[in-house]
């Protein structure tokens, strides 16, 4: 049984009942700076151990692992502190805000022998698991190209979101194109397009409404195209990825609640595309948490975190991520994505934004696997 502590109880509260029901977890403690919110959540879920101070939580020898759901600027610092305190770490995306911080986390996991997993929802969504199954069964044939997008209107989101460079929150589109074939990004080139409102642009000195990047993968003939927008672009929320093979290709639907399309080669032209229903993959999970792939953890829709409702439930990914993190600890193996993979995916976005500021210059990624 792994004693879990959840840090940050906005989005983080979505995971409490999953850990409470998982056969290898003890939902041991919660941490939140807002005392009223801390006690509200603690009382609702019957969690006795409650911390308002993160350092005090880390000093508790009974905590085996922390699941960090704090604001983006805190991810690297809190991950490094937890690893240094001898805890395993799961952290919501992105891993960090600088390439240097990503490197520090990778080094810390190797030096301290602890597990780190970036909780990237897309690579545990039912759509990704469906395409992964097609690929592993040979139905796609040779993969020739990958593409992904994440478009979202972030107006009205709090604190650190206004004016954020689009590629600084890119793991939802980098993860699937790198993760399907376990590819490592080698270098990236990115262009900015359009401009956002001046009051937003001056916050991060980032003017672009859209950033679009090409990623070249190491030791592979493949490249991928990803694009992001956060402000001043008319688009329904869309996290999408597409995979083109020589036998079959998978294309994401244009509008939420429609169906994706499978294209099959060598059929008569009108028969090539076919709409498909993506199945759920609860069968891959312990029975105790399988139900969480198709419903949120709160009783009422108005209580669900905006990222969960706007993101269409994150493709049923939450219990899959929890199960992977816990299984990696119990089985003493690397989780997916591990620290080096998480650093690679996160750094693609960070360096893509740098490339956009330099007019599309090619920027090579560090070798995180061999630090």
Image (cartoon, rainbow, N blue to C red):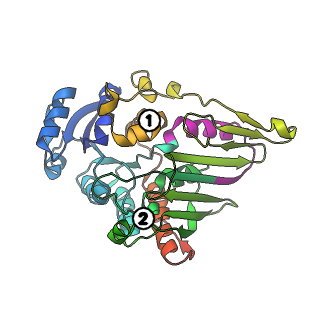
Tell me the CA gap for discs 2 and 1.
24 Å
Question: Along the line of sight, which residue is nearer the eye, 149 or 109?
Answer: 149
Q: Earlier in the sequence, mark 2 or mark 1?
A: 2
Local secondary structure at mark 1:
helix
- Residue 258 image position (x, y, % from top left): 60, 34
Which stretch appears magenta?
124-146
Residue at point 51% right, 68% down? 194
* Residue 104, image quadrant: bottom left
181 vs 341, left or right, is right
- Nearer to us in this view, 61 or 279: 279
Q: Which of 290 and 169 lies nearest the eye of the viewer? A: 169
Q: Looking at the image, which residue is at 73% across and 47% down? A: 245
* Front in this rendered view, residue 161 or 242: 161
Q: Is residue 255 visible?
A: yes
Instruction: Name the residue carrying label 1.
Output: 313
* Left or right: 84 in relation to 371: left
Q: Identify the residue at image location x=51%, y=58%.
A: 228
Q: Is residue 137 magenta?
A: yes
**Horizontal and vertical percent position of residue 126:** 54, 35
Neighbor class of circle 1 (other Cα within 10 Å; few <14, some 14-19, many 20+) is many
């Amino acid at each position: 049984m792994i004693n879990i502590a959840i840090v940050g109880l906005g989005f983080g509260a979505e995971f409490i009942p999953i850990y409470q029901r998982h056969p290898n977890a003890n939902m041991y403690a919660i941490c939140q700076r807002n005392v009223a919110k801390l006690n509200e959540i603690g009382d609702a879920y019957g969690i006795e151990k409650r911390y308002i101070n993160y350092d005090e939580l880390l000093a508790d020898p009974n905590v085996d692992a922390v699941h960090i759901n704090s604001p983006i600027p805190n991810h690297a610092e809190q991950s490094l502190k937890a690893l240094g305190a001898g805890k395993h770490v799961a952290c919501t995306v992105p891993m960090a805000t600088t390439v240097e911080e990503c490197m520090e986390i990778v080094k810390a996991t190797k030096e301290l022998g602890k597990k780190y997993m970036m909780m990237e929802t897309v690579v545990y969504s039912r759509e990704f698991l469906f395409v992964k199954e097609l690929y592993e069964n040979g139905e796609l044939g040779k993969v020739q190209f990958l593409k992904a997008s994440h478009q979202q209107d972030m107006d009205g989101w709090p604190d650190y979101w206004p004016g954020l460079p689009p590629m600084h929150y890119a793991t939802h589109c980098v993860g699937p194109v790198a993760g399907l074939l376990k590819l490592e990004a080698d270098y990236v080139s990115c262009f900015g397009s359009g401009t956002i409102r001046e009051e937003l642009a001056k916050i991060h000195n980032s003017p672009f409404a859209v950033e679009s990047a090409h990623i070249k993968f190491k030791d592979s003939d493949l490249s991928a195209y990803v694009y992001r927008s956060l402000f001043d672009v008319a688009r329904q929320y869309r996290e999408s990825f597409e995979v083109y093979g020589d036998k079959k290709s998978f294309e994401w639907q244009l509008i939420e609640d429609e169906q994706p399309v499978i294209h099959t080669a060598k059929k008569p032209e009108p028969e090539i595309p076919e709409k498909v229903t993506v199945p759920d993959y609860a069968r891959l999970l312990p029975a105790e948490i399988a139900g969480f792939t198709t419903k949120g953890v709160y009783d009422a829709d108005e209580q669900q975190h905006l990222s969960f409702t706007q993101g269409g439930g994150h493709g049923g990914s939450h219990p899959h991520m929890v199960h992977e993190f816990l299984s990696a600890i119990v089985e003493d193996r690397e989780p997916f994505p591990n620290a080096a993979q998480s650093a690679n995916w996160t750094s693609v976005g960070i360096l893509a934004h740098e490339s956009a500021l330099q007019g599309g210059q090619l920027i090579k990624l560090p070798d995180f696997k061999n630090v």
